[in-house]
């Protein structure tokens, strides 16, 4: 499996410091896992994307080109960020290669604030939807628990499927996962995006916008393990790990485990 490092943090506006070190910090813990929980040996190859912290546009273009190239292999791969804005060029490249692709996003925040140009980690999803890169009915949000009034209105207007943490805790992780899979299985291809802040800060403190009351690490691993069973999963990304805010590297280690479970 290929892992594409995109060490870019400038799409995170004011809380970017340290995000550019996320990919390297996570990668150094991959070797700590002898195999994944399904008993498979994790074989991975790391590739770098050259980014420019002062230039969002050029960095996004570089990410777009690199993802586009890997899509040609038609093999599952992972983009490792960096801030969530890099999901914009990554999904766009994926959707160009896989028309009609759908999008599952684990995130404490829906990232559908009003437009910035170029897109940032606050609005990349809204930009993808408004620009017609993804259909609103092929977006599934999982784990949201802090949205602005405008974001809530936008999600309702567009009828975007949004499994809030409240809904997950009331319905149960298993039931919610069944529902997600029954819809996502019908897409020609699926892209999975994991913002590490979907987790409770107790498990993943190393991120810019920690939100109390998140998923446990075990719940997220369960969801990932099941979603990976879908034949149409084409690629995934893992974003918003900030080693400068971490405590004893627990977030980086957990992110490494998530990658191993995806491989
Ligand atoms: Mn987030």
Image (tube, rainbow, N blue to C red):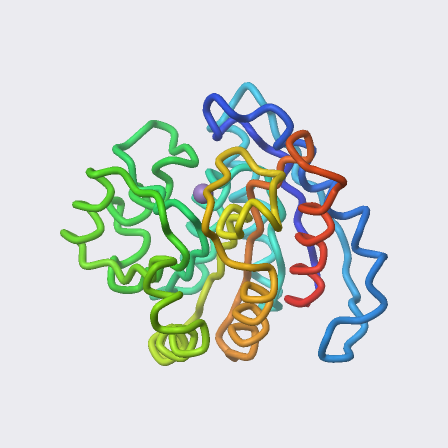
Residue 59 position by quadrant: top right
Outermost top residue: 54
| Residue 140 located left or right of residue 196 | left
Q: Which residue is drawn at 31% across and 56% down?
A: 134
Question: Where does the image place residue 17, in percent across and percent down from the top left?
Answer: 60, 23
Q: Residue at x 32, y 64 (%)?
A: 167
Q: In this view, does 155 lie above or below 44?
A: above
Q: Quadrant of the N terminus?
A: bottom right
Residue 121 position by quadrant: top left
Question: Where does the image place residue 123, in percent across and percent down from the top left?
Answer: 34, 37
Q: In which quarter of the image is the C terminus?
A: bottom right
Q: Which residue is drawn at 30% across and 59% down?
A: 162
Q: Which residue is drawn at 38% across and 66% down?
A: 168
Q: Write down which quadrant ligand 1 falls in.
A: top left
- 180 and 234: which is toward the camera: 180
| Residue 181 located left or right of residue 263 | left
- 170 and 109: which is toward the camera: 170
Question: Where does the image place residue 108, in percent across and percent down from the top left?
Answer: 42, 48
């Amino acid at each position: 499996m290929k892992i594409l490092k995109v060490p870019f943090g400038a799409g995170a506006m004011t809380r970017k410091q340290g995000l550019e070190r996320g990919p390297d910090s996570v990668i150094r813990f991959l070797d700590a896992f002898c195999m994944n929980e399904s008993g498979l040996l994790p074989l991975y190859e790391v590739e770098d994307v050259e980014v420019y912290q002062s230039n969002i546009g050029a960095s996004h273009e570089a990410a777009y080109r690199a993802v586009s190239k890997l899509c040609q292999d038609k093999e599952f791969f992972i983009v490792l960020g960096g801030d969530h804005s890099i999901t914009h060029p990554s999904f766009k490249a994926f959707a160009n290669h896989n028309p009609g692709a759908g999008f599952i996003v684990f995130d404490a925040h829906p990232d559908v604030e009003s437009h910035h140009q170029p897109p940032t980690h606050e609005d990349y999803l809204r930009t993808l939807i408004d620009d017609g890169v993804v259909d609103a009915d092929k977006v599934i949000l999982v784990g949201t628990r802090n949205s602005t009034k405008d974001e809530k209105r936008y999600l309702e207007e567009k009828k975007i499927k949004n499994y809030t943490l409240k809904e997950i805790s009331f319905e149960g992780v298993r039931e919610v996962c069944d529902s997600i899979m029954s819809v996502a299985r019908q897409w020609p291809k699926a892209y999975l995006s994991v913002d590490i802040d979907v987790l409770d800060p107790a498990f993943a403190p190393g991120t810019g916008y920690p939100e109390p009351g998140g998923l446990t690490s075990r719940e997220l691993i369960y969801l990932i393990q099941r979603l990976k069973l879908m034949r149409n999963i084409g690629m995934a990304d893992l974003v918003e790990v900030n080693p400068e805010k971490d405590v004893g590297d627990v977030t980086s280690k957990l992110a490494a485990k998530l990658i191993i479970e995806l491989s």
